[in-house]
Image (spheres, coloured by chain):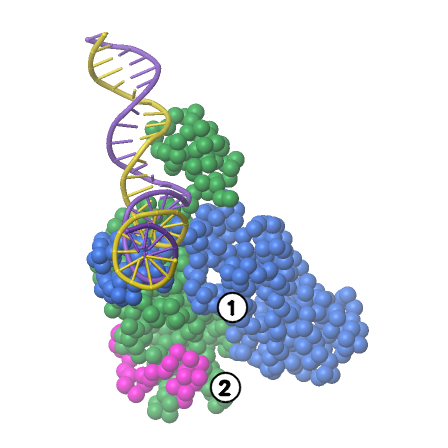
Chain colours: A blue, B green, C yellow, D purple
Amino acid sequence: MTVTIRDVARAAGVSITTVSRALNGGDDVGEETRRRVLEVAKKLNYRPSHVARSLVLQKSRNIGLLVSDFNRGGHHFMYDVLVGVHDKLAEYGYDVTLVSTNTARQQLISYVDFCRERSLEGVVVMGIRLDDPYVEEVVESTLPSVVIDLPLLSRHCGYVMTDNVNGVRYAIRHLANTGRQHIGFINGYSQAAVSIERLRGFETAMRGCGMPYSRDSILHADFTIEGGAKALAELLERCPETDAVFFASDLMAIGGIQHCKACGIRIPDDLAIIGFDNIELGKFVTPALTTVAQPRYAMGADAADMLVRMLQDDEQPSGILLPPELVVRESA
Amino acid sequence: MTVTIRDVARAAGVSITTVSRALNGGDDVGEETRRRVLEVAKKLNYRPSHVARSLVLQKSRNIGLLVSDFNRGGHHFMYDVLVGVHDKLAEYGYDVTLVSTNTARQQLISYVDFCRERSLEGVVVMGIRLDDPYVEEVVESTLPSVVIDLPLLSRHCGYVMTDNVNGVRYAIRHLANTGRQHIGFINGYSQAAVSIERLRGFETAMRGCGMPYSRDSILHADFTIEGGAKALAELLERCPETDAVFFASDLMAIGGIQHCKACGIRIPDDLAIIGFDNIELGKFVTPALTTVAQPRYAMGADAADMLVRMLQDDEQPSGILLPPELVVRESA
DNA sequence: ATCGTACCCGAAAACGTTTCGGATCGCAAG
DNA sequence: CTTGCGATCCGAAACGTTTTCGGGTACGAT
C-alpha cells in the first residue's frame, strides 16, 4: 500500500542505508547512485514516514499550542496569535498540534505528560492566568515553553507580551495632551497578568504627567461589555468630575460607550474613552474607538521564534516586550 | 531519561508483553499481576509513546485541520469552527495538527502527501473555494476528508455547511412580511460555493413570496466592507426604488450601513438591511444588524464527528446541512 | 500415568527510519 | 608484493510499542 524506503531501495538496486543517505544529503554515496535513487523515489512518490523518523531520532519536530481556555472572549486575539505561531513554526519545519486544557482528556493527566506522550518538543502557551493551576507546571517543568501575555521566566520557560506599561502611557499622554483633567481607569480581572501591568502603567503615566488621581477613580471589571458599562456607571457616580476614562480592554470600552449613549453623555465632548486591544469591532462602533493596538500576529511569531531558538541552538529563554501602538479614532 | 515500557516491565518483574496487556486491558493477565503493573506504571509515571504506537499500529490517531487561507476575513468563523473541530476530536481521542496551504512548505508538495508524511488519518478542510486547485485533490484522494462550506461529495469526502437556501429564505420572508416591495441582493465573490447557494436561495425565496425582481437588483461584491458600500451605491443608482437589501455577508452589510450614513439614508425607515453570518460586530454597529446566524461551532463539531465515523465505523461520507437562524435586530 | 483445559506469561517479529561499524574495491605508495 | 587509503556501499542494531504464537504450570478427570 504505502511505499517505504525498502521499496525505493529495491527499485533502485541499493540498500536502504544508501537510500536514506542519498535523500538526506549524506556524503558517502556516489553521484550516479544518488541520481538514480532520487529519480526512483520521485517516480514512486516516496514520502518518508515522520513517525518512524521521530522514533529513531527521538525528535518529533512537533510542538504544541496550548490554549488554556478556548472559548473565552478574545477570539480575535487568540486567532491572530495562533496564525502567527503556525506560520513561523511552519517556516522552520515544525508541525503544531492543538492542546486545550478544558477537554476531559487533559483533566486527567498533566499537560506536561500530555506533551510527553506525544513527544512534543516544546509548547507555546496562551490564554493562561496568574491563578491558573498550570502556571506552576509551566515554570517548573523542563519542557521548553513560551508563554504569551504572562511574564513567566525560568530555565525552560520564556514569554512574550505587549509592553502594557508603555501602551497605557501612550493612552494617558494622549488624554493629557488633549486637555483632559480627571482621568479614570477601568481595569480588567485582577488576576490577569495584563491587569497588573496596566495598573502599573496607569500609575506611572499619571505621575509622569503630573496628574493627580485618587483610588476611587480606579475600578475593576471582568473584560466584558456589560462589566464595562456597569463599571463606568459606578465610576461616574463616585467621581462625577471625570472627563476621560481608560479601559483595559476594548470590549469594556464599548460597554462604556453604550452606557454613555443610554445616559446622553456625549463622546468625546463630555467624556473621552480609550480602550486596549484594537479589536476589529472598535473601528465600527460610533464613535469609533480610540485604542491601544497589540501586535498579535507578531506576538505569536516571536514566541514561536524564541521556542525554536531554544530547541535548536539551545538558547536561554527570555522575556520579550513588543511595542504597542496608539490608534486614534473618534472617541478620544 | 524517559521511562519506557521496558523499565516498567523490569520494575514489575514481568515481560513487556505483560505490561502492554495489563495497561491496555488485555484479558490474559492475572489479577494480581495487573495490579502490580498498574501500580509500578503509576509510580514511575510511565507514558506510552504515541509515536512508537503509531508506528506499529499504523494509525496515528491524528487528523489534520487544513485551512486554505489563514488570514482571510472570516476570523470569527474560522476560529469557532476550529474550536468545534478540536473539541469533538479530543472527545474521541484524536489529536489535531494544523495544516495551512499558504506556507512555503505546502507549495512544494501536495497536501495529500503532506498528510501521508505525517500519517494523518483524515482531514477537515475549511476556507476553500470552488476555483481552488485543492478541490480536485480533495475529491479524488482516498484520504478521508470533510469539507466545510463546500458541497463536495465522493467516496472519501463529505461536507457540512449551513443551509444557505433556507437562511436566505428566512431573511427574504422577513423583509416581505414587514412590507418591503423592492428587495435587492448583494452577493459575494462568485466563485465561493456559498455565493451560488445564496443566489439560489434568493431566487426561490423571491418566487416563493410572489415578488418580482430584475437581474439589475442582483450584484456581486467581494465580501469586504468597502465592497459592500460600493455595491450598494451602484444598486441604488440602478434601482432607486429599492427599499430593502439582503447582503451575503455581514461585513458587506456593514459597508452598506456606512454608505447609508454617508448619504443620509435612514435605516430601516428608508432602507432595510439584512446580513449573513452573525459576526460579533453586527451587534454593535448602529443600527444593530439583522442577520442570518450560522452555527459555527456545531459545523466544526459535526464535521469532526462525521470524519471519526468514517474512520472508525467506516461509514459512507455524506452531506450535512445545518439550520441557520434569523437574528432580528434593528436594521430590518 | 495420561490427557485435556484453563490460565498466565514470554520470545520474537514487525512497523519505517537513521546510523555505526565494517566490507569491498581500486589504486597509489612503500 | 604488501600496505594503506579514499571512495562507495551494506548489514545490523536501535528507537518503543503491539501482537502472534507457543510454552509452561496446575488441576481435575479419565
What kind of element bears circle 2? helix
- Residue B254 horizontal side relative to residue A252, left or right: left
Amino acid type, mark 1:
Ala
Closer to viewer: mark 2 or mark 1: 1
Q: Nearer the viewer, residue A126 or A89?
A: A89
Query: Residue A268 has which mark?
Result: none
User: Within 10 Å of the Cα at label 1, are there few (<14), some (14-19), or many (20+) other Cα atoms?
Assistant: many
Q: Which residues are magenta?
A: B204-233
Residue under label 1, please give it. Answer: A301
- Residue B230 horizontal side relative to residue A113, left or right: left
- Residue C3 horizontal side relative to residue B15, left or right: left
Q: Is residue B207 magenta?
A: yes
| Quadrant that contains the C terminus of chain A | bottom right
What kind of element bears circle 1? helix
Q: Nearer the viewer, residue A28 or A191?
A: A28
**Residue at 60% of width from left, 71% of height from top?**
A322
Residue under label 2, please give it. Answer: B261
**Residue at 36% of width from left, 88% of height from top?**
B235
**Residue at 42% of width from left, 60% of height from top?**
A95
Report the number of numbered marks: 2
Residue A178 pos. (x, y %): 71, 84
Q: Nearer the viewer, residue A84 or A202?
A: A84
